[in-house]
Image (cartoon, rainbow, N blue to C red):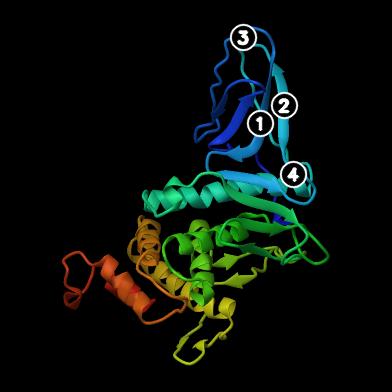
Amino acid sequence: APQCAGTAAVPLPDAQVRIVGGSSAFGDEDGHFTLESSSLDPVTVESTLVGRYFRVSDRVSSRDALLSMSVTPPATADFLHEAGDEFSLAQVNGYLNATQVREWLLDVHPEYPTIHSQLSFPVNVNLTGGYCPGNAWYDYSSINFCQASSGYANTSFAGVSHHEYGHHIVTSGGSGQGAYGEGMSDTIAMLIADDPGLGYGFFFNQCSAPLRSADNDCQYSATTCSTCGSAVHSCGQLLAGAVWSIRNQLAQSHPETYREILANLVVNSVLLHTGTSINHQIPIDFLTLDDDDGNLDNGTPHRAQICAG
């Protein structure tokens, strides 16, 4: 959460810059851009937190980030979106974190349905209505984050952002939400961070305590979903916990490649899943994806680690 760490300047991939009344361009993965101008007179160049794939909006305060400077071509323009307060930091985080999880997904599956070609997905930050305070949510057309309030941090930060976009990955993959959506979204955030904890600092003054943890001993129950509970977030910990256990097995047997192996299994398993439940089909899907000869009866390359998890 913002109060738990310092800030650092990092590139904003695919962010848009434009000459007022003239051309526009998107930056590359390192934030570098080139604007075409036929004028040798000064022009006004603007940078916002709008990019090729995401559009950040401060829906309450109307403080949408906007930087501008006068530039005389040919020249270099450098923009730094400073995290001067909670609201500006939430906007920068909103853009960067959504970009991170999308890039992670497409590194695993470059043609992932819907997401691989989707432009201008909305990221709404600093909200006070809806499910606020102390919340974040996916509504099938955007991801949404709350302002800080008594007891809660601003929810536009990495783990929470990755989780909420995880719901969009689940929907785009053709699956339902419910307990499965919560568990898979926790799993996606966990794999990106390579950390079982989700939402460190979600509550003020709890920077060492996650909101939820995949380092758990939740066990499957045919009647209540999980020994950790039947509510969707509690039940979801069953799936995240199982995948974290597989991760630990693979980290021992394949220390150089365990993250790649597991990311491929998890992402592609979403495309095989239907409905909202966490059930016996999921480990079968993992084994099917892991298989290399079309015969599950003779095992798969990582069967021992998958079944141990």
Residue drawn at the location 20% of the way across and 64% of the way down: 292
**As drawn, is 109 to the left or to the right of 11?**
left
Q: Looking at the rendered structure, which numbered label has been put on residue 39?
A: 3
* Residue bearing the label numbered 1: 47
- Three-letter residue code for mark 3: Ser
Judge by depth and name the residue closer to the eye, 149 or 306: 149
- Three-letter residue code for mark 2: Ser
Residue 83 position in % (x across, y down): 73, 42
Rendered view: 209 above or below 232: above
Residue lying farthest top?
A: 40
Q: Secondary structure at mark 1?
A: strand
Spatial CA span between label 2 and label 3: 18 Å
Spatial CA span between label 4 and label 2: 16 Å
- Mark found first going from the N terminus, 2 or 3: 3
Residue 226 position in % (x across, y down): 51, 85
Q: Secondary structure at mark 3?
A: loop
* Residue bearing the label numbered 2: 68
Task: Report if the CB atoms under discs 1 and 2 are less than 8 Å apart.
Answer: yes
Q: Secondary structure at mark 4?
A: helix
